[in-house]
Image (cartoon, helix red, strand yellow):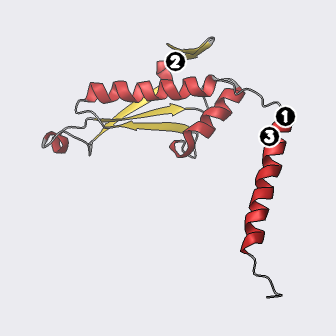
Amino acid sequence: MILIAPGIWLDERDISESFVRSSGPGGQNVNKVSSAVQLRYNVAAADLPADMRARLIKLAGSRITASGELVIQASSQRSQPANRQAAMERLVELLAKAAVRPRRRRATAPTKASQRRRVESKKRRSQTKSLRRTRGDE
């Protein structure tokens, strides 16, 4: 069990791993050894709060399959254990990001100074454009 956020744990039994041939660094070794790891985490069946699940699906984007699985692939390292660790760290980081509830935006009125600046810039722009105009009476 890995702690994601207070009260939210990741059960490692919900994660499946498969190893595939990597296209990353490793020279000739790449052609012989399956060092890249593909982690699959079933978001649909996971024991997560509903709002966190929705944020996770949004954050994951194209890494979520149609069946509701989150797929993370790691192939940047030469060794299988290092890629496995990198993929697990990415999964935990993504889950931790999804666990954070966004703060609600409070609507505020623009300040007097910002309104004044906006009007001044509009006046300057208007003045510039009016100076460019050709007069018809010349």
Residue 16, image x, y percentages: 43, 29
Residue drawn at x 24%, y 38% as measured from the top left: 34
Q: CA distance from mark 3 to mark 2?
A: 51 Å
Indicate the position of residue 105 as horizontal and vertical percent values: 78, 31
Q: Residue at x 64, y 23 (%)?
A: 100
Please give the residue where the numbered disc 1 appears in the rendered image.
107
- The number of discs equals 3
- The relative height of residue 44 versus residue 121 in the rendered view (above or below) is above
Q: Nearer the viewer, residue 97 or 81?
A: 97
Q: Residues within 10 Å of mark 3 (few under 14, many from 20)?
A: few
The part of the image, by quadrant, that contains residue 108 is top right
| Residue at horizontal 42 percent and vertical 24 percent from the top | 89
Tag 3: amino acid: Ser
Residues 54 and 59: in front is 59
Query: Mark 3 — residue?
Result: 114
Q: Nearer the viewer, mark 1 or mark 2?
A: 1
Front position in the image: 68 or 8: 8
- How packed mark 1 is, by other alpha carbons closer than 10 Å (few <14, some 14-19, many 20 or more), is few
Q: Which three-letter amino acid code belongs to the residue tagged 1?
A: Ala
Find numbered disc 3 in the image and state the secondary structure of the residue it sits on: helix
Name the image quarter holding residue 26: top left
First in sequence, mark 1 or 3: give its number. Answer: 1
Question: In this picture, is 13 found above or below 40?
Answer: above
